[in-house]
Amino acid sequence: MANKETIAVIGADSENARLVVTRLVGTARNILLMDPNVAKLEAFFQSLCSMPAIATIEIINCSREASWEADMIILSAEVEDAIAVLQKISDVARNKVVIILSGNDDQPFGSLPDALPYSKIVVLQMYQEINVDHFTVLIESTDCEAATSVAALFESIGLITTTHSLQ
């Protein structure tokens, strides 16, 4: 039997991370949740535990430890916080897909890939269409293979994806 893929979600209490995690619980994966706001994260974790879930969900108190254990890392944070987290996890995120989750297109995430030169960085912009109950995800990366695998993951949880190569 193959091992389940492990996804670390750092900044798990943000609105976009909550949306993604809520959909990921229906998949056969291990999900590691980390957020500096422990009280809100615990409440979110309890709400996930009340849902019908296939995934194994766990709270991890350290972004570096969560990244070490993960096959894929999802980071949802403001740019300044994201840079600090990326510096903290840089040695354990080598050769892993690191997804930078953003809710709008006015955050300058362009310099973040420089913080993890040996990782496969994928930047996601999430949009909710007006008067529509679905989200569209714009995927940007210089690594086509990573962008394709992230698109497949997000499509498997019901999100519409558009991929844009940054090469």
Image (tube, helix red, strand yellow):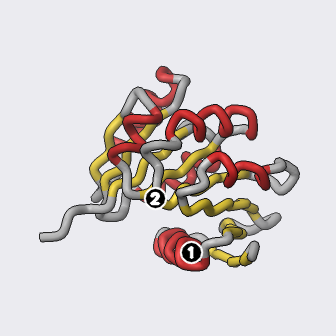
Which residue is rendered at x = 40% and y = 27% of the image? Answer: 61
Against 144, residue 116 (above or below) is above
- Please identify the quadrant where the C terminus is shown: bottom right
Which residue is rendered at x = 48% and y = 30% of the image? Answer: 41
Earlier sequence position, callout 1 versus callout 2: 2
- Please identify the quadrant where the N terminus is shown: bottom left
Q: Position of residue 37 (x, y in %)?
A: 54, 23
Q: How many numbered dots are placed on residues in this image?
A: 2
Which residue is rendered at x = 60% and y = 78% of the image? Answer: 144
In 3D space, how far apart are the residues under numbered discs 1 and 2 (Cα atoms)?
16 Å
| Disc on res. 105 | none
Q: Position of residue 163 (x, y in %)?
A: 69, 77
Against 97, residue 62 (above or below) is above
Q: Is residue 6 visible?
A: yes
Pick whichever, 149 or 68, lies toward us.
68
Q: Is residue 158 visible?
A: no
Residue of label 1: 151
Give amino acid for label 1: Ala
Residue 62, quarter of picture: top left
Give amino acid for label 2: Lys
Task: Please indicate whether residue 126 sits to the left or right of residue 35 in the image.
Answer: right
Residue of label 2: 96
Pick whichever, 66 or 129, lies toward us.
66
Which secondary structure, mark 1?
helix
Residue 135, quarter of picture: bottom right
Task: Please indicate whether residue 44 sits to the left or right of residue 29 in the image.
Answer: right
